[in-house]
Amino acid sequence: MNWRDVFISELRRLFSNPAVVFTVFGGIIIYSLLYPLPYANQLPRELHVAIVDHDQSQQSRTFIRMLDATPQVKVVKQLGNETESSPYFASAEIEGVVTIPQHFFRDLLLGKSPVVSVGGDASFFLTYGTIVEGVVATGSTLGAQVKVQRTLTHDTPMPLATKQYAPFSLNAVPVFNPTMGYGDYVVPGVFMLILQQTLLIASGMLGISESGSHSGSASNPVSARNSKSLWARTAILAAIYCIMAMYYLGASLDINGVNRMADPLQLAAVILPFLLATIGLGTLIGIAIKRAEMITLIVLLSSMPLLFIAGFVWPSSALPSWLNIIAQFAPSTVVIQATLQLNQMGADFQSQLSHLTQLWLQAAGYLGLAFLFKIRLKGKH
């Protein structure tokens, strides 16, 4: 077969396979629209909390009003004791409970530090942290008011009293994630993992050996045994996924309000070896497994482990060394770090040469093994 016939044959195999077409086109578009939706608000706000006020003083009621005014929490119930909060936690009516101790007002007047207890649903770290953040902010503000008022009683001018309470001011400027939101933090990296997983499924299904089947139908032995088919399939998938990758790293991030800073050519230089490595790895999976439904299942089950060893959801330094070594064999681990540093952190392209080298080594290794096994399979037929 000449190259023109090989390309036409591979295009027919791709577009005549509904599972592959849906994975490549439907999966990419659907994920880009649905995955960012839960993180549209970036941070949890107005979390429902209950109050247990053992002091019942004017100052404790002021504290409750100030707490309810914060963007983090919303006071929805006042209870007599902490044990009453259990059924409300169980029914998800509240996410936290704040206990104001007895003698809260007296301790403030005496210059002591009353202990306000906070109970929250720690199974959701963002929820628990947000409740604590709201309580700390309220306590700090109320404490400042009390200290300034105490200083004013000694005929201290207001500007001086304010400076005495806070001799320095903190100007916190978040970098790389201006909104401090979860969406900006996780979506760009997950998009790269989605590209890898869908491409693994597509290339694996198309790379199933002649002895296997495409959803139960016999494959074309002439095309599958010819190494030209792998060249053609690699070129076709790489071209399609180059467009998908640019959509994910460009327009999709813009739509979801995620900042991007990299030059498109720099991203393309990183994406190309990533796609080649993934196509080669997917072809090897198809040769080894020979069942389309098993390829999908195995790739999907590997998604969560790959997400957590990629080094952006959980730091690589906190992973066992042996797990870090295994993670380096996944193209997603390398490309996630490279694209995040380039696109979200504004890193210089020269700093990514090690990642680029690793991706090209993976591409050469996986594609080389794929061609080797193709030739061996051809010789057996």
Image (cartoon, rainbow, N blue to C red):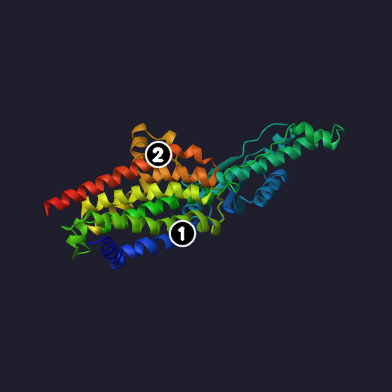
Asked whether 29 or 306 is in front, the reply is 29
Q: Please give the name of the residue rendered at 35% of the width and 43% of the height, measured from the top-left corner.
A: 330
Q: Residue at x 58, y 50 (%)?
A: 50
- Dot 1 corresponds to which residue? 32
Question: Which residue is under mark 2?
Answer: 357
Circle 2: residue type: Thr
Asked if residue 86 can be seen in this view, the reply is no
Please tell me which residue lies in front, 149 or 352: 352
Query: How many residues crowd mark 1 within 10 Å: few (<14), some (14–19), many (20+)?
Result: many
Identify the residue at horizontal 27%, vertical 59% (top origin): 206
- Residue extending farthest left: 381
Q: Residues within 10 Å of mark 2 (few under 14, many from 20)?
A: few
The quadrant where residue 82 appears: top right
Residue 355 percent across, percent down from the top left: 43, 39
Looking at the picture, how far across and down is residue 119, in whole percent? 54, 43
Residue 92 spot, x, y in % from top left: 49, 55
